[in-house]
Amino acid sequence: MTPELRDKLLNGLKDGSIVPYLGPGVLADVRCVATGAAIPADSDSLIIAMNGGKPMAAKLMYEFPRAAMNIELKRGRNTVTKFLNRTYGDTVWTRGAVHDWLKEIRPPYVIDINRDTQLQDSYADQPHNLIVGIARLGGTDFRYKLYFWDRVAYHKSEVINPALPILFKPMGTPKPVPSYIASDADYVDYITELMGGFSIPPAVKELRQGKQYLLMGLRLTRDTERMVMSDIVYAAAQPAGWVLIQEPSEKERRFCKKQGLDVIEADVFDLIGTEALA
């Protein structure tokens, strides 16, 4: 990463022309305050945490949604929801360096496919819009809920105020009301409606026209993450942006070329000038 490119990315993030897209790797330095254990964020760590600290069968270890579907079928959806609430809503975690960095930059629009609350905490001192992904709920054609934060609490909303920051949590969050995209069935439903245009508010569809994106902490080796990402960044500029991958695979390189994403062979901690904990 050249100094010129770094300056370009930073300036674009600040003025909103480049949208940060956060994956599990941005939480690499986050630890449990009580135990020092790393936050489960990527697929493998989530599966192991959900299964009481032990790996599941090889076919279930392939991807968290597959493992979550197995648990949901055997023990009910509430079991998965309780695990995610306990992990991201009840456990106290250290602050991540990336989120402290984003708090200083304050991008006007952020996409975060993690299910933790650190992004929301970063914007807690100012009013903002929150979009939370939902799946398989009756009574609505849409796969999102809108909230407005007034510096004290979240309130249900019907519209987005484009003058305020927009935080998009497509895979869910425990706050203000727990809602998650977790199992295979969730993802199938959510992606289907995402492709049909029902998982993104109209104001964001308009806002995203011609934007560029910076993918941080996200590997692009699995179809689920790739499908979600390509539909969320639909109507991006050309080129669509950049992705930080320290050692990209050939599969990732091919996919990024097809999507119009330039691969930067570095990670997010190189960008922000610090190191992840081992």
Image: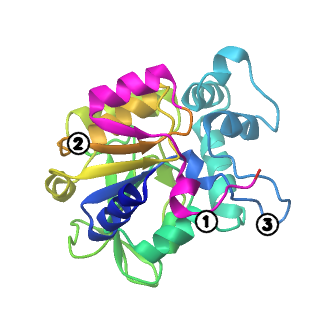
Coordinates of residue 229 in the picture (x, y in percent): 36, 38
* Region rendered in magenta: 248-277
**Numbered mark located on residue 97 in the image:** 1
Crowd rating for badge 1 (residues with CA inside 10 Å; few <14, some 14–19, many 20+)? many
Q: Which residue is mark 2?
A: 198
The mark that comes first in sequence, 3 or 1, is: 3
- Identify the secondary structure beneath mark 3: loop
Q: Which residue is mark 3?
A: 33
Question: Vertically, is 68 above or below 41?
Answer: above
Q: CA distance from mark 3 to mark 1?
A: 15 Å
The mark that comes first in sequence, 2 or 1, is: 1
The mark that comes first in sequence, 3 or 2, is: 3
Q: Tell me, what colour scheme is on the image?
A: rainbow
Question: Vertically, is 62 above or below 132?
Answer: above
Amino acid type at image mark 2? Phe
Q: CA distance from mark 3 to mark 2?
A: 38 Å
Question: Vertically, is 165 above or below 140?
Answer: below
Residue drawn 32% across and 38% down?
Answer: 261
Amino acid type at image mark 1? Ala
- Per the image, is 259 magenta? yes
Residue drawn 34% across and 33% down?
Answer: 191
Coordinates of residue 145 in the picture (x, y in percent): 34, 56
Q: Is residue 64 left or right of residue 158?
A: right
Residue drawn 74% across and 41% down?
Answer: 49
Crowd rating for badge 2 (residues with CA inside 10 Å; few <14, some 14–19, many 20+)? some
Q: Is residue 84 left or right of residue 142?
A: right
